[in-house]
Image (tube, rainbow, N blue to C red):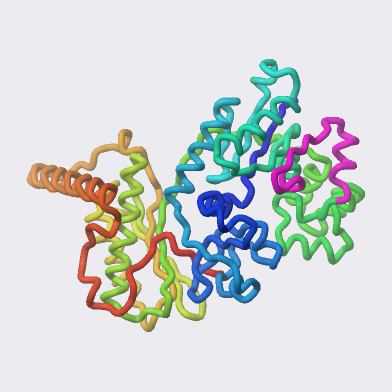
C-alpha cells in the first residue's frame, strides 16, 4: 500500500504579501486586478474569503463585496521564488514529488517510510518545517493511501491543518460518506446537477447506488470512475516529470480596444514574452496560435504551423502578426493572446534543411537572431522588462499590456 501526502499552501500569494507587509496581517488582502479594472482575483486571504471573495472572481465583484480590502498586483517572480524554496523542502523528504502548481504538490512517501518512526512523525516534521523555513507561510497537509484521499484530507483541514486518513476500507467509506458529491474528482457543476436531480447529494449516496443505476445518470465511464472514488479507490501514481505542451500569454484591456496599431504592439509584446519563456526552458515551438475575445465575450482562436521549430522573437512576432491580419477582425477587442504549442526540446530538435543556395544566409540570419534575443533577455533581466520595447507605444492612449493580467469568464 502506498502512502501519499498532499501539501497545499494556505492562500499562498496573499500570505506572502501579508508576511512581507506586517501591517496587512489580519486584514482582507486580494491579489489580482484592482477593483476598478477588468480582471480577476488570483488569491484572497482568509480574511477576504469571509466576505465571499474567491479565486477567479471578477475583481469588480470582489471590490463590491469588500470595499475596504487591500488589492495587490501579483508579484509572480517572488511567488515563483518562494515556490522553488517550498519544492526544495519537499524534495528533501522524498524524490517522488509531483508539483501540481506553484503552491501544491503530491509526495509519494512509500520509499522513505523506513527512515521515520511512523507516518505521523514524518508528516508533523514537514508541517512544522514549512512555516519555519518560509517565514511563517503555512500549509495544509493530507496523508492517505492515494492521491484522491490525500487531496480531500488537505482540503478538509484548511487552513494550517494536518489530517491523516485511515487505511482500513470501512473506515475510508465512513470518512467519505457524509461529504458532498462535488468532492469527487470529475464531478463539476453540470455532473453534480445531474446527480442531484436523482437525489444523489453526498458520497454516501453514490456508495449506496448500484453502478448500473449511476451509469444511467452520468454514463458508464463516469459511473465507474466516481463509484471507485466514492469508496476511496484511486490508483493514479505520483508523476515526478511532465512535459509542457504549450506556452501562452494574454492581456485584457481596461477598455475595449479598436486601435489596430496598439493591438499589433500588444501582440508583439506578448510574442516576445512567449519567446523569452521558450528560451528559458530550452524549448522550440512548431505551432503558433492567436486568441481574440470580443466585448460580448465571444472568443475565437486561430493557429498555423511555424515554418520551422523556433524560439526566435522575430519568427514568433511575424507569425503572430500574420495570424492577426488573417483574422481580419472588425471592431474592438476585450482580450488578445498569443501562444505556441507542439513544443520540442531545443537540444533534440531535428535541424531544418534549407536548400543548398540559401543554407549559408539562413545560418547567418539565425545566428544574428539568436545573439540578439540573448542580448535582449540579458538586458531585460538586468534593467526590467520595460527597458527595451519594440514599436511606438506613445502613439496610443492605451496603457501598455501586462502579460500577467487576468480575465473574468
Q: 384 or 359: which is nearer to us?
A: 384
The residue under the point 58% across, 51% down is: 15
State the extent of the magenta-drawn residues as a range: 154-178
Q: Is residue 145 above or below residue 376?
A: above
Closer to us: 38 or 160: 160
The residue closer to the viewer here, 370 or 341, is 370
Q: In which quarter of the image is the N terminus?
A: top right
- The image quarter containing residue 263 is bottom left
Q: Is residue 158 magenta?
A: yes
State the image quarter where residue 326 is shown. bottom left
Q: In this view, does 108 lie to the left or right of 250?
A: right
Q: Where is residue 386 in the image (x, y as percent from the top left)?
A: 28, 60
- In the rendered image, the vertical position of residue 203 relative to residue 161, given as above or below: below
Residue displayed at 53% across by 45% down? 102
Q: Quadrant of the C terminus?
A: bottom right
Residue 58 drawn at (x, y percent): 57, 70
Using the rendered view, name the quadrant where residue 148 is placed. top right
Amino acid at each position: 500500500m502506498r502512502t501519499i501526502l498532499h501539501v497545499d499552501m494556505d492562500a499562498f500569494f496573499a500570505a506572502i504579501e501579508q508576511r512581507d507587509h506586517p501591517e496587512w496581517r489580519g486584514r482582507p488582502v486580494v491579489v489580482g486586478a484592482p477593483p476598478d479594472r477588468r480582471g480577476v482575483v488570483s488569491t484572497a486571504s482568509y480574511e477576504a474569503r469571509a466576505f465571499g471573495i474567491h479565486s477567479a472572481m471578477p475583481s469588480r465583484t470582489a471590490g463590491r463585496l469588500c470595499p475596504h480590502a487591500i488589492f495587490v498586483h501579483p508579484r509572480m517572480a517572488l511567488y515563483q521564488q518562494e515556490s522553488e524554496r517550498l519544492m526544495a523542502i519537499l524534495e528533501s523528504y522524498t524524490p517522488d514529488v509531483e508539483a501540481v502548481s506553484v503552491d501544491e504538490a503530491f509526495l509519494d512517501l512509500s520509499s522513505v517510510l523506513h527512515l521515520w518512526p511512523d507516518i505521523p512523525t514524518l508528516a508533523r516534521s514537514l508541517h512544522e518545517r514549512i512555516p519555519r523555513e518560509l517565514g511563517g507561510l503555512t500549509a495544509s497537509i493530507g496523508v492517505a493511501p492515494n492521491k484522491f484521499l490525500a487531496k480531500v484530507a488537505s482540503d478538509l483541514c484548511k487552513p494550517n491543518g494536518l489530517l491523516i486518513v485511515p487505511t482500513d476500507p470501512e473506515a475510508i467509506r465512513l470518512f467519505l460518506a457524509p461529504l458532498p458529491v462535488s468532492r469527487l474528482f470529475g464531478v463539476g457543476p453540470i455532473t453534480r446537477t445531474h446527480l442531484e436531480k436523482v437525489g444523489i447529494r453526498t458520497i454516501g449516496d453514490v456508495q449506496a447506488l448500484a453502478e448500473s443505476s449511476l451509469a444511467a445518470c452520468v454514463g458508464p465511464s463516469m459511473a465507474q470512475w466516481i463509484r471507485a472514488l466514492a469508496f476511496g479507490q484511486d490508483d493514479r501514481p505520483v508523476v515526478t516529470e511532465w512535459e509542457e505542451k504549450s506556452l501562452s500569454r494574454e492581456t485584457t484591456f481596461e477598455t475595449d480596444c479598436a486601435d489596430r496599431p496598439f493591438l499589433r504592439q500588444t501582440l508583439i509584446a506578448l510574442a516576445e514574452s512567449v519567446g523569452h519563456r521558450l528560451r528559458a526552458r530550452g524549448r522550440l515551438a512548431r505551432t503558433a496560435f492567436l486568441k481574440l475575445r470580443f466585448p460580448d465575450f465571444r472568443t475565437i482562436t486561430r493557429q498555423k504551423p511555424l515554418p520551422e521549430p523556433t524560439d526566435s522573437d522575430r519568427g514568433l512576432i511575424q507569425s503572430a502578426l500574420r495570424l492577426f491580419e488573417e483574422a481580419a477582425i472588425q471592431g474592438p477587442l476585450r482580450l488578445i493572446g498569443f501562444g505556441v504549442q507542439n513544443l520540442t526540446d531545443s537540444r533534440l530538435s531535428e535541424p531544418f534543411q534549407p536548400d543548398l543556395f540559401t543554407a549559408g544566409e539562413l545560418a547567418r540570419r539565425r545566428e544574428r537572431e539568436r545573439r540578439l534575443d540573448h542580448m535582449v533577455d540579458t538586458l531585460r533581466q538586468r534593467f526590467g522588462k520595460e527597458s527595451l520595447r519594440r514599436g511606438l507605444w506613445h502613439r496610443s492612449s492605451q496603457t501598455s499590456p501586462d502579460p500577467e493580467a487576468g480575465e473574468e469568464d
